[in-house]
Amino acid sequence: MSDANDVAGGPWKSEYLALHDPVTSLPNRVLMMEFLAGALSSPREGQRALAVFALDIDNFKHINETFGLTAGDLVLAEAARRIRRCIRDNDLVARVGADEFVVVATGLTGARSVEGLFRRLQTALGVPFTLPGGGVAYPTADIGITLAPQDAEEADALLHCAELALARARSEGPGACCFFAADMNDELAGRRTLEGDLRRAITANEFVLLFQPRCDAKTLQLLGVEALIRWDHPQLGRLVPDEFVPLAEKSGLVVPLGEWVLRKACDTISRLPELNVSVNVSVVQFRGGELVTTVESVLKATDLPAHRLELEITESVLIENTDKALDILERLKGLGVRLSMDDFGTGYSSLGYLRTFPFDALKIDRRFVGDLDQSKGALAIVQAILGLGRALGMQVVAEGVETESQLQCLKADACDEVQGFYLGRPMTEEALHAYIAERRVVC
Ligand code: C2E
Ligand code: CA
Ligand code: CA
């Protein structure tokens, strides 16, 4: 076997172009598959063991958007050089997707040398990339590893195993590494089925919207509700958002799903005159560019005054693409809707954006509220967020209030609004009507 990374016939041959990636000069997927098939069918003496590494630079899109496509290409070319330096001449590295590489390493003996290569790759790619304009990119690589002959003996099957391992690494990332395990095939099959079910579920009307009270912290008057989705799956029963929203985000289905939630929430609350409603908006809904027109048309169709709708977003929206996000948030504000920062305190802790972005409210994450009774640290964080909100003229909402003593703590520090099981669990529209009627009697 010749040096697999050699240029077959020089860079000007069309054959070369058909088998190599122009940005990195690395072999492409076709050449990699040929090489892998060859290595599996006629291994060198004593080199039957072979490892396939699938690597992906997980924040490459962010690098492209922040520094531009030329900088993105330079990062890819540099990443390719660094990977090549980690492997031996007889091994191969190929670029197989926008930000995906595959390394085929032959002659590795035992888990230790596989692990050694993985560590070399991680170290090499972990060094920041300095860009021509002086910018610095900090890519991280997720890595999936599979071994022949134990995981599979055919090139296609082996690559499939490496991709499954990479998918698991991505879900654990950033910077994670996973070896292939047999249960990954079942998991993938399960995910595919669930994704198919999700597509069908929107038209089959399997989603349910629950509403959780948001109350004035001082008077406990009901001010509004947060809309929270559930999925009544025909076989699996009632699923909570953590079990399907990430999948809906990955497949893009969260866009039609988010629109359904918005329409249903606004429609329901338009019939309850004094109440406001808040709706969670996923970062993926910000990417599409239709969010503003969707919100506008839903408000029109449901006749809900814009000031009664609040959109809850998380910090990830701001991290991904600051300028675009700011533009969308300002256009939403222009419609008259309220904006709140959800799960405050759990994200990237960059406070600069709070002055730049037009938020009306901060929602303190329930993790801090839950620890209020026991931990001085949690109390200090809650007090700091309340101070920050006051200084910036934003309302502060505490989530996850479960006890009277947590409520008293929040009242003492002049929190504006409270939400949590102590005030009311997420409930159906009918239960919400009963909740409102009951409170009228008490008042
Ligand atoms: P979130 O926005 O932080 O919503 C609050 C979550 O805390 C809800 O979980 C709610 O049931 C739970 N919770 C409320 N009070 C308490 C309490 O006192 N104690 C405890 N332990 N938990 C409390 P849920 O409904 O499972 O929703 C989880 C997450 O899923 C939400 O977190 C939100 O990020 C997301 N989500 C829910 N509905 C939607 C939706 O329609 N669209 C999108 N994109 N995401 C949604
Ligand atoms: Ca929320
Ligand atoms: Ca939250």
Image (cartoon, grey):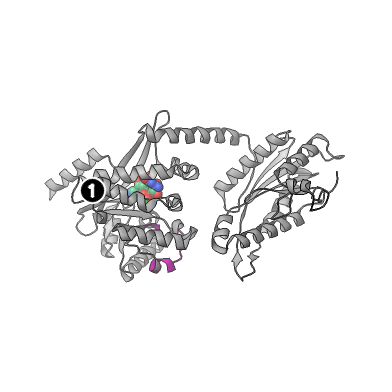
In the image, residue 80 sits, relative to residue 238, either above or below, namely: below
Tell me which corner region of the image, top left, top right, bottom left or bottom right, holds residue 318: bottom left
Query: Residue 287, how many percent across, how many down?
Result: 46, 52
Quadrant that contains the N terminus: top right
Tell me if mark 1 has few (under 14), some (14-19) or many (20+) residues whose alpha carbon lies within 10 angstroms of its own: few
* Picture residue at 41% right of the left edge, 56% below the top: 314
302 displayed left or right of 171: left
Q: Nearer the viewer, residue 56 or 386?
A: 56
Span colored in magenta: 341-355
Q: Between 196 and 387, which is closer to the camera in this rendering?
A: 196
Image coordinates for residue 237, horizontal then vertical, percent: 39, 31
| Residue for badge 1 | 303
Residue 422 shown left or right of residue 8 in the figure: left
Q: Identify the image quadrant of residue 167.
A: top right
Q: Is residue 325 visible?
A: yes
Identify the residue at horizontal 85%, vertical 40% (top origin): 44
Left or right for 154, reference 377: right
Image location of residue 55, percent across then percent down:
65, 49
Please, which residue is most extreme toward the top here?
A: 235
Residue 20: x and y, percent? 73, 49
Query: Could you say which is closer to the camera, residue 384 or residue 75?
Result: 75
- Residue 420 visible at all: no
The amino acid sitting under disc 1 is: Asp
